[in-house]
Structures are given as C-alpha cells and as structure tokens.
Amino acid sequence: MKGRIFSGVQPSGSLHIGNYLGMIRNAVALQADYECIYCVVDLHAITVRQEPEELRAQTREVTAAFLASGIDPKTSIIFNQSQVAAHAELAWIFNCVARLGWLNRMTQFKEKAGKHRENASAGLYVYPALMAADIMAYKATHVPVGEDQKQHLEFTRDVALKFNHDFGADFFPIVEPLIFGAATRVMSLRDGTKKMSKSDPSGYSRIDMTDGPDLIAQKIRKAKTDPEPLPGPEALAADGLSLSSEVAVARPEAFNLLSIYASLARKPLSEALRVFGGVQFSDFKRQLTEVAVEHLGPIGTEMQRLMADPGYVDGVLRDGAERADAIAGPILREVQDLVGFLRVK
Ligand code: AQP
C-alpha cells in the first residue's frame, strides 16, 4: 500500500458529475493501491441550513453513490462523519492551532458567504479546520479532491505543521492532494465560469448522478454554448495537454463540455479537440449525451436500487463507523496527551 487516503463528500444536495469526475471516480481507482477511508461529511453539510429529513436521505444518497460507483465497503471504510466523535473533538483543537489570518484567506468561504457574510454560520468560517481534522484524525497521507479543495488542503498542511511545531512532536504527516483526470473542475452547464455545484438553484446547471437518459439529453441540449464551431488542436496550450488560457477564458462553455466529454470517455483533452475541432455544438452534444448516458446510466440505476434499501445502506455506515473509530480514537487520545489534557478515565 502506498499510504492512507481520506476523502469526503457533503450530503448537501443531489450529487452531480462534478462530484463524480472530480472525486468519486478517482476514489474508486485508488482502492487498488491505498488504504481508503471515504466519509459522508454531514458535519460539514450543516454549515448551511439542512432540513433534518433531507439530510438523512442525502446521507444515504451519497453512500449509495459511493457503493454504486464501485467503492467496496469490505476493503474501504465508508461512514458518516457525525458518528465518529474524533472529527469534532480534533476540529476544536485545530481551531485553537489555526490562525484567523489563515481562515481569512479561504476563497471558498468568500464564495459561499457571498454578500451576506455577517449572516453566514460560524461553522462555515471554520470549515477548513474541520476538514483538517477529518484528514488528520486518520493521519491520512493523500486526499483525492477536485481543484476547488486545493486551498483547504494547503490549510491542512499548515495546521499539521504548526501542531507538530507547537507541541514539539513529529506527529501529523504532511498530506498530499491527488488531483487527476480531465475534469478536475467541472463548470455549470448554464455558466461556464461558475463551478457546477449541488447548491445551485437551477437543476439545469448540472447533470445529477441519478438523472435518467431523457433528462441527461435534455440538460445537455439546453447547455449554454457560443456561436462558433468547437475548437480544434490549434487551441491546445504549449504543453499539448491543456487548452490555451486564451481559449479557455474566451470560450468557457466549449472548454467545459469538451473536458466533461474527455473525462467521461477516458480520453485526453487533445484527442477530444482532434475529433471535434470544427464540429457544430448540436452534433457534439449528441455524442456527449451518448457517452454520459452510457457511463452514468448503470450507476444511477444502482443508486436508486440502493436508496430503496436503507437497511443495507445504514448497515454499511454502521460497520464503517466502528472501523473508523478504531483508527481515529487512539490517534485522538495521543493528541490529547500532547496538548496536555488530564486523563481521568
Ligand atoms: N464542480 C466540480 N468539479 C470537480 N470536482 C468537484 N467537486 C465538487 N464540485 C466539483 C469535488 O467533489 C468532492 C465533494 O464535494 P463536496 O460535497 O465536499 O463539496 P463541494 O466542493 O462544495 O461541492 P458542491 O457540489 O459545490 O456542493 P455545495 O453546493 O453543497 O457546496 C470534493 O472532492 C470536490 O473537490
């Protein structure tokens, strides 16, 4: 094994292909080489208001997505965060290690809090400290994430280093992000400059993992484009792998749809550009629909089947929580000793 993986998905709405291509599909592949811990991060989800019944349903939905995508609950650990106390306990200690200046730099808080910063929950502000605790409670070495989470991982490294320094111990490892695939940042289908997100009020901004073929086709048909035919290989950057930044900025929707296609079809972006350069969007969209339906269809069907069997899903989470607790509990106790908490039991 090359190390220990921790990664999480919030049960804060319907899962979409951004979550799938940015994280879940990579999480499946990593099982071959790493010890994997995959978490439904319900403590993170309540940093914005969630309806209790929906939160429970979405927790089962994320679990179903993990299972249907190919995460094996026998070899990997799948659980929901609130059921392992070490996350919240270590997060408090990290709140006291992290500096306000570090939190003030976090762009995700700025994006999510928007103009109503004063009304955002305190939890949303200290979210990165909880994320650091999630990872460090298991001394995870690698975290597969989409591009959007890179800054939070840097924060995790800073907290781990400061903890090690403050308490004079070489205790926490320095975690590495694993960001790979042609779609590390999938953008909204309605606006190629905005990240595809569960909390976007428009269902047409994303393809959900449970969407059936007709809905997938409809959403792709309605996806925003521009009047030009698709760009070809001449739009590649000097590295021959990514799109030149001028084209990516000028034609964000074309770039997004081509990246989604390349990622779903498991082809390099350069090949997608070669095949579709000069083609009209309407023709390309038909092929994109085909590959999306072929890839997501079986996963969506299996998710629906699993969601209709909550007893099984809850059993997977229960078993996972016990196994997660057995790893995180002893690490937390060592942290408490380092910090100086008096143990009386
Ligand atoms: N658009 C995206 N492209 C690539 N990867 C993405 N991820 C999320 N959106 C995209 C990756 O999916 C994993 C789980 O994300 P999350 O549920 O923890 O939270 P998020 O990043 O805040 O996702 P959303 O969909 O935008 O949710 P809301 O709207 O609730 O905030 C992460 O690894 C993330 O990188």
Image (cartoon, rainbow, N blue to C red):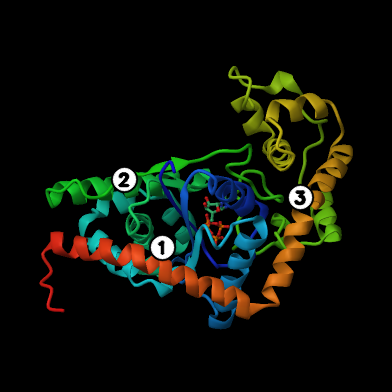
- The residue labelled by disc 3 is 295
Q: Which amino acid does label 2 sit on?
A: Arg
- The residue labelled by disc 1 is 117
Task: Tell me whether the residue at label 1 lies in contact with that at label 2, contact meaning CB atoms closer than 8 angstroms.
Answer: no
Where does the image place residue 228, in percent across and percent down from the top left? 81, 31
Q: Which of the 4 image quadrants contains residue 129?
A: bottom left
Closer mark to the observer between disc 1 and disc 2: 2
Image height of 81 relative to 30, above or below: below
| Residue furthest to the bottom | 53
Secondary structure beneath label 1: helix
Q: Which amino acid does label 1 sit on?
A: Arg
Secondary structure beneath label 3: helix
Task: Tell me whether the residue at label 3 lies in contact with that at label 2, contact meaning CB atoms closer than 8 angstroms.
Answer: no
Q: Which residue is drawn at 55% across and 67% down?
A: 11
Q: Distance between the residues labelled 3 and 2?
A: 35 Å
Secondary structure beneath label 2: helix
Residue 47 in view here? no
Where does the image place residue 245, in percent across and percent down from the top left? 59, 27
- The residue labelled by disc 2 is 157
